Image (cartoon, rainbow, N blue to C red):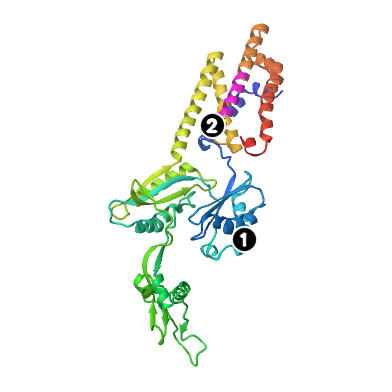
């Protein structure tokens, strides 16, 4: 009999019990604590921009070709897309729980590449982004300036160049992005009347800017083949792309001795530095601000991400320009953090109540300690199976506690009965008691397990729960 082996070797049994207890205590601190287990499907997000398009045009010209190619990718459950009136497309593809997020991203990227030739040229030039990120925001950070010292464009550019890059370097926050289009650009506002009178078209302006504002490789002076020996060669550096509006004003649109002479860009348009797109006007408490949305990457701990972002912002605040500040306007991990505190309190309350109940019924500190050892050892199995301490595993732990305590009470009661009725020593009474009820104890555990195990074979999220 298996139990007799330990009954006849009490020192070995105590040694095993101590090892199991210590392992359970160590693994309990190693287990991650969260409100609920991770049971959401794997998500891959496809983002595209079609400047100037309405939602219907965006859905027909961009979303439809991409959806047609992505449909049917391996392990895909379903997908959903949202086309906004400002030319922004967000398509989210959901995969089964056992799918590798990296493999899913590669498969979606390959399907998007097949759809790229069917997309409008403006969309292809801006690019189609494929990322494995959650669709919900865990943090929303507002960067703003007090007073009128800084313009909204300056704030957006500072947040994009300095703050966003620092947040993206944090583990688990690599998919952070600014709400809207923060990239700076040179804005050319054309005068239709002047263009019509001089015979200048929009295409003429576009071609002139593209040809006269480009960086070319002009070669090298002294490069072979040469007539004789050359000791040094010098690279030819051409004019850098324009960065000032006045430089754009001098771009020549047409040069003719017959009609109009030289027509420059400043004759038909005005230029200024601004944002690439004005699709969002964001304010924080009535003050112009730029918002940074932080998305949690798959497999990342939301609490650790939030903590790292807060620490980074505190360190960067001292380097902000005078009058600029930040505010965390949304942090969904605050609710999770409070829930986790309740989970931890519930865990220790459950352990304490079990110990008190066992001691109340058995009236033996030694027996109570044995039950507590069995309870603590449960955490070793939780870590081995990849579980975390959450509301669902605590519910399972309560069920396990009930079976352990019930079996312990039955064994102790039967040992006491054999000692009183047959006048046996504690050792002999324990051996006899285990011979009588070992099969019953195993049967009770199997019956309890048979109630819950079949539910694990249900497909999808139900089986995971």
Residue 299: where, in percent of width, then height? 54, 45
Q: Is residue 18 visible?
A: no
Magenta residues? 393-406
Residue at position x 55%, y 13% in the image: 361
Q: Decide which of tag 1 and tag 2 comes sooner along the chain.
A: 1
Pick the residue in front: 14 or 273: 273
| Dot label at residue 99 | none
Can you say which quadrant of the picture contains the N terminus?
Answer: top right
32 to 52, vertically: above or below? above
Residue at position x 55%, y 58% in the image: 57
242 to 347, vertically: above or below? below
Residue 171: where, in percent of width, then height? 48, 50
Pick the residue in front: 18 or 370: 370
Can you say which quadrant of the picture contains the C terminus?
Answer: top right
118 to 231, vertically: above or below? above
The residue identified by callout 2 is 391
Query: How far apart are the two marked residues, 1 and 2, measured between alpha carbons?
Result: 44 Å
Q: Which residue occupies the extreme bottom position in the image? A: 227
Label 1 residue SS? helix
The residue identified by callout 1 is 115
Residue 447: where, in percent of width, then height? 69, 24
Q: Is residue 106 left or right of residue 197?
A: right
């Amino acid at each position: 009999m298996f139990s007799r082996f330990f009954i006849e070797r009490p020192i070995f049994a105590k040694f095993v019990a101590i090892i199991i207890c210590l392992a359970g205590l160590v693994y309990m601190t190693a287990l991650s604590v969260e409100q609920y287990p991770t049971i959401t499907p794997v998500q891959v997000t496809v983002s595209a921009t079609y400047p100037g398009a309405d939602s219907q045009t965006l859905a027909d010209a961009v979303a439809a070709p991409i959806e047609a190619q992505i449909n049917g990718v391996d392990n895909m459950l379903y997908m959903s897309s949202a086309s906004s009136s400002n030319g922004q497309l967000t398509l989210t593809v959901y995969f089964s729980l056992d799918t590798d997020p990296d493999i899913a991203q590669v498969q979606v990227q390959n399907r998007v590449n097949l759809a790229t030739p069917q997309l409008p040229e403006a969309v292809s030039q801006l690019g189609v982004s494929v990322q494995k990120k959650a669709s919900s925001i865990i943090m929303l950070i507002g960067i703003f300036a007090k007073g009128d010292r800084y313009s909204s464009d300056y704030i957006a550019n500072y947040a994009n160049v300095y703050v966003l890059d620092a947040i993206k370097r944090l583990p688990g926050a690599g998919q952070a992005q600014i709400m809207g289009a923060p990239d700076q650009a040179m804005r050319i506002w054309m005068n239709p009347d002047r263009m019509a009178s001089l015979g200048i078209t929009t295409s003429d302006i576009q071609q002139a800017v593209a040809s006269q504002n480009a960086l070319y490789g002009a070669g090298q002076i002294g490069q072979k083949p040469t007539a004789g020996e050359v000791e040094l060669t010098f690279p030819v550096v051409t004019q850098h792309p324009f960065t000032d509006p006045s430089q754009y004003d001098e771009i020549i649109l047409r040069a003719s001795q017959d009609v109009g002479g030289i027509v420059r860009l400043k004759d038909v348009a005005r230029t200024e530095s601004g944002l690439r797109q004005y699709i969002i006007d964001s304010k924080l408490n009535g003050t112009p601000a730029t918002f940074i949305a932080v998305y949690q990457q798959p497999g990342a701990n939301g609490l650790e991400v939030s903590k790292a972002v807060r620490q980074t912002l505190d360190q960067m605040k001292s380097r902000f320009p005078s009058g600029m500040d930040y505010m965390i306007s949304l942090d969904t991990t605050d609710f999770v953090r409070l829930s986790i505190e309740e989970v931890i309190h519930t865990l220790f309350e459950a352990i304490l109540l079990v110990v008190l109940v066992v001691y109340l019924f058995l009236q033996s500190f030694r027996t109570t300690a044995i039950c507590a050892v069995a309870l603590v050892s449960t955490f070793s199995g939780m870590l081995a199976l990849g579980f975390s301490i959450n509301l669902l595993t605590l519910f399972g732990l309560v069920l396990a506690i009930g079976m352990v305590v019930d079996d312990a009470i039955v064994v102790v009661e039967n040992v006491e009965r054999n000692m009183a009725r047959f006048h046996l020593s504690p050792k002999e009474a324990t051996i006899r008691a285990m011979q009588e009820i070992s099969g019953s104890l195993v049967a009770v555990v199997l019956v309890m397990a048979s109630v819950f195990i079949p539910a694990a074979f249900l497909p999808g999220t139900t089986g995971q729960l």
